[in-house]
């Protein structure tokens, strides 16, 4: 079954998130697939209550690399789990670039997610310059190695990887299907070589209802990570129905 993730980023106020989550719950009333919403931290508790009886799961956009203690401003994975968070994005390109999140930090966040039974969704992808210089595959392999090399095969049983070319996020420029699938093959190969079999690989980057299908199919990605179109329940439902 394909996996569909809506990342709401910091686009909505808590009141707007509640209203939007109610609309999502209605639109997904009869949904049978695997889809989740990632609201901002302030909205998680309220959205969690709305989604509790829905067919949608809850994800967070990030989590702390610590679970309890003197870590000012951090959000504990323990508390996320108790709010019903089942998945967490880790290393979204906006956090890597605006907040300088390092591979070492991402590895610590993955460890924390796993130890609290939260499914980590590790985001990787090259920026425009790296692509232009022909370094996309090297960059992605380095990101995988940096975040995952310290884990055992058993540790990473629940891992999901999202390939998100940075130049495509929020720009309306989606990646060419064949080029995206070449990256997916590289990620699959890297995982297999490390003994991590069957890691689902999602695509993200300007996915809309009219281009989503091109990334899916039996030989395509295992799901989609959606930003802009994931704010609108009807658009996200059209995408999530391409199961
Ligand atoms: C994202 O937020 O990860 C994303 C892919 O955004 P968009 O779909 O708007 O490009």
Image (cartoon, grey):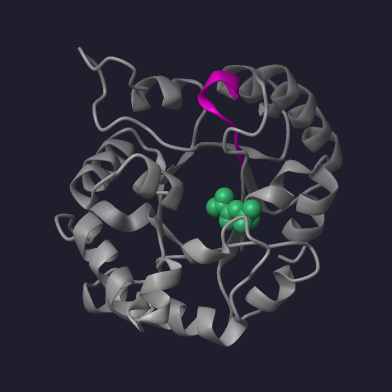
**Height in image: 74 above or below 174?**
above
Residue 39 on the magenta segment: yes
Q: Please state the horizontal and vertical placement of residue 39, each as a whole percent of the image.
A: 59, 32
The quadrant of the rendering that contains the C terminus is: bottom right
- Evaluate whether residue 35 shows in this view: yes
Q: Is residue 148 left or right of residue 30?
A: left
> Which residue is at the front of the view, 45 or 29?
45
Region of the chain picked out in magenta, as a range: 37-43
- Evaluate whether residue 216 shows in this view: no
Q: Quadrant of residue 110?
A: top left
Residue 168 on the magenta segment: no
How many discs appear?
A: 0
> Which residue is at the front of the view, 59 or 136?
136
> Which residue is at the front of the view, 90 or 87?
90
Q: Residue at x 73, y 22 (%)?
A: 18
The quadrant of the rendering that contains the N terminus is: bottom right
> Which residue is at the front of the view, 33 or 127?
127
Q: Please state the horizontal and vertical placement of residue 203, each as a whole percent of the image.
A: 55, 66
Q: Please state the horizontal and vertical placement of residue 178, each as a whole percent of the image.
A: 56, 87
Quadrant of picture, ligand 1: bottom right
Q: Quadrant of residue 20?
A: top right
Q: Residue furthest left?
A: 150
Q: Residue at x 24, y 72 (%)?
A: 195
**Height in image: 189 above or below 85?**
below
Q: Please state the horizontal and vertical placement of residue 128, each as a whole percent of the image.
A: 45, 70
Q: Residue at x 52, y 78 (%)?
A: 180
Q: Quadrant of residue 172?
A: bottom right
């Amino acid at each position: 079954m394909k996996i569909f993730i809506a990342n709401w980023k910091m686009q909505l106020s808590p009141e707007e998130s509640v209203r939007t989550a109610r609309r999502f719950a209605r639109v997904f009333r009869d949904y049978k697939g695997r889809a989740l919403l990632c609201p901002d931290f302030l909205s998680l508790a309220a959205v969690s209550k709305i989604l509790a009886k829905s067919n949608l799961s809850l994800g967070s956009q990030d989590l702390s690399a610590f679970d309890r203690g003197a870590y000012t401003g951090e959000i504990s994975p323990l508390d996320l789990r108790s709010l019903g968070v089942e998945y967490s994005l880790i290393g979204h390109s906006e956090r890597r670039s605006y907040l300088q999140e390092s591979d070492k930090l991402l590895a610590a966040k993955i460890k924390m997610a796993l130890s609290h039974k939260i499914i980590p969704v590790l985001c990787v992808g090259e920026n425009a310059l790296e692509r232009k210089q022909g370094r996309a595959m090297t960059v992605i392999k380095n990101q995988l190695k940096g975040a995952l090399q310290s884990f055992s095969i058993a540790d990473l049983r629940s891992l999901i990887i999202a390939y998100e070319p940075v130049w495509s996020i929020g720009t309306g420029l989606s990646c060419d299907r064949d080029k995206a699938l070449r990256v997916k093959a590289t990620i699959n190969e890297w995982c297999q070589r490390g003994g991590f079999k069957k890691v689902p690989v999602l695509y993200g980057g300007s996915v809309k209802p009219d281009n989503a299908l091109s990334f899916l199919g039996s030989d395509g990605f295992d799901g989609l990570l959606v930003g802009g179109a994931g704010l609108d329940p009807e658009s996200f439902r059209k995408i999530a129905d391409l199961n």
